[in-house]
Image (cartoon, coloured by chain):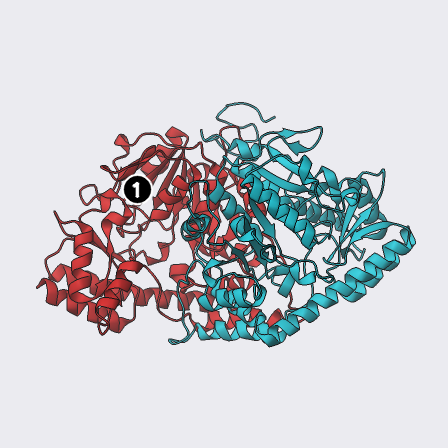
Amino acid sequence: IARRKAAHMLKYPDAEVISLGIGDTTEPIPEVITSALAKRSYALSTQEGYSGYGAEQGEKPLRAAIASTFYKDLGIEEGDIFVSDGAKCDISRLQIVFGSNVTMAVQDPSYPAYVDSSVIMGQTGEFQKDAEKYGKIEYMRCTAENGFFPDLSTVARTDIIFFCSPNNPTGAAATREQLTRLVQFAKDNGSIIVYDSAYALYISDDNPRSIFEIPGAKEVAIETSSFSKYAGFTGVRLGWTVIPKELLFSDGFPVAKDFNRIVCTCFNGASNISQAGGLACLSPEGFKAVHEVIGFYKENTDIIVETFNSLGFKVYGGKNAPYVWVQFPGRSSWDVFSEILEKTHVVTTPGSGFGPGGEGFIRVSAFGHRGNVLEACKRFKHLYK
Amino acid sequence: MVQPSLTVRKEGVGRCTKVHRNFNLEKLRNGYLFTEIARRELQHLEKYPNAKVISLGIGDTTQPIPDNISMSMANYARALATAEGYRGYGAEQGNKELRKAIAETHYKDVLVKESEVFVSDGSQCDIARLLLVLGSNVTVAAQDPSFPAYIDSSVIVGQAGDLEDEVGKYCNIEYLECGPGNNFFPDLKGTSRTDIIFFCSPNNPTGHAATQNQLEQLVEFARNNGSIIIFDSAYAAYVTDGCPRSIYEIPGAREVAIEISSFSKFSGFTGVRLGWTVVPEELLFSSGFPVINDFNRIICTCFNGASNIAQAGGLACLSSEGLEAVHSVVDYYKENTKILIDTLASLGIKVYGGINAPYVWAHFPGRKSWDVFAEILEKTHITTVPGSGFGPGGEEYIRISGFGHRESILEASRRLEALF
């Protein structure tokens, strides 16, 4: 995508290219949070404030704040939380824990890191060009027809199931009923769900924000999340992973223990400065500010949804996530991507980049300055009127 | 051994899944060395709550980061609250300015390009990522003794084979013994070929800095065998006597070596998290495929770049003002180390290292290193690291680190004098 954008900018040096492609946050971080980042930075130059190596699992106050903010009353404790430098990194660390001999299932379409990290770990077979799928991965189709929740009766058993909700790229948030079925499916199959909840705070309705809201989930699920899309920490780097004590391998060995070993050996903790920022995000003032920024991006999303709706497109997502999933039936998503880029100078993401199930769709991300989002929508209206 | 296949555990913690544990992780007998040291220290504190424990174990920096560097980080952080200063995702390979500064500062006299420098959140993390690039089918050599992450990560990735309990060695790893007998440089003539050779200089834990001549032998060995050296230069700033600070000072190294390094011991960034890896363009797999392309792919898939604030700090470290400030802190730790060497030497204990690294490698012939560790901890309330934690070649040795406040180092010296 970046390559195509660069080529386009060379071709049209005066065009004002608007990026609604890569989901990169654009709005400044609230001051209450940056002050905490700055304060910790200064403190490192003082005797009392200097700290060296931190606990690889993360600083205790932050772990406690994450537990009480996101997992209150769900039976998840500070000790179950592992602070990371982002969900993408933890996905790979989880893959290292699992090793090359496990099988995995992903939603189709899905965030590419799940499949790519699986290939790197040696869990997959060869890429099958015609199907555009890797051998040995179970692709769980998520379509408009099935409400973007897979028909589990057609899904083969795998050891690991990656599930992202609210979903990137489709924007679909699974319902309590759907997640209950997913947890039951995992229980019946003795599988482990890796639940990516990076967009949970974008939920508008009462869909579950955590897999642990589902009874029994602690015995089958890991949850991974991130400060990236909540606090604009895409560059600051901070996230977390929850591994309940109850989650056990087939021999009874706790998964958390192996993850801890990987975290101690292959990682050295998230930056202490970033962690100070994370703690500020979860203070009452910080959390309020975080919700305001999320609210801003949600308004962007509404504008984009309204635009495509008004143009008569079938539009999905956008309600519970900062992504709008627009259908272009019968068309190649790369062709649509190119058309949009060429004719409106707006970068989007072709759905097939997320798996064969994304073909025929374009993902429009809602991260951007309001002015750019409005301008982009104006251009879409002009192109597709 | 845990009870077999039942779906309900006796302790009632929960039902097991049917996912098999990664058998590579089963091969790791103990917890990570430094986790164990921390645990023992905590245990000791519980036993002696009033003891003033001095930590010369885990090599953790103690001196504050120089003002101008922390100021840069604070300024960068504040700017994130403004429209002009806000930054989202950075390039996974690192901020261009920082990559350039690293190339120009640390590799001034050798030909390392900005594009060959990858900024990381620390060496320990990049070691794992490098092993992901290399995969489970490569063979590995490591010095014995060595920093535990090399071998532990190799085990995790599936390269190491089984642990031979009696000798404490993994059967697929080639152990390059380094001791006073061979001047802390392995006898390469007696060494089998492996795909990868981990080599750390100045060395953790022995403190030995390999000479130009020794590194030339190593590079020649790698060239002849078609191997890749992963050269850990995290302590290069501590070199005092003119030994090479980078593997690339050796002609021909660009075709056989990757270099990893870190701001941790250089700038006190142990908590801030910043390092780098150099992968030269000329380094090719047997098929001719550039290693740098695969490393880049791993970086883009399994990582999302080091924290932008940490990178701003790194850039400040490499300004002339920053370098000067950072070198004073390094000198402070070097002076600490000298005090420890002098103390131990005066007690008649044979000590190695300490000249080119912040570690002193003390020999206690005939004694088990964990016993000496325990004795020192019990009788002087000083934490050290038992040499066998770094491999069987570390048995009979204790690693004492020179990181600490000067008063702690002086007090530790007094206590050691009293004990020995």
Q: Nearer the viewer, residue B414 or B94?
A: B94
Q: Quadrant of residue B93?
A: bottom left
Label 1: state its secondary structure: strand
Residue drawn at x 66%, y 58% as measured from the top left: B244
Say whether residue A253 is visible. Answer: no
At 49% from the left and 29% from the top, the residue drawn is: A250
What is the x, y in percent for residue B417?
A: 90, 55
Q: Residue at x 29, y 71 (%)?
A: A369
Residue situated in front as seen by the camera: A73 or A385: A385
- Colour of the chain lettered B: cyan
Q: Who's red, chain-wise?
A: A
Q: Which residue is mark 1?
A: A107
Task: Please state the horizontal and vertical placement of residue A122, each as a whole percent of the image.
Answer: 42, 36
Q: Residues within 10 Å of mark 1 (few under 14, many from 20)?
A: many
Quadrant of image for the C terminus of chain A:
bottom left
**What subunit carries mark 1?**
A
Residue B339 pos. (x, y %): 82, 62
Is residue B315 among the parts visible in the rendering?
yes
Picture quarter containing residue B235? bottom right
Q: Amino acid at mark 1?
A: Gln
> Is B145 on the left or on the right of B126, as rendered?
right
- Viewer-nearest residue: B206 or A101: B206
Could you tell whether B45 is left or right of A137 in the image? right
As drawn, B18 above or below A339: above
Q: Position of residue A360 (x, y in %)?
A: 17, 48
Report the side of B309 relative to B381 (left or right): left
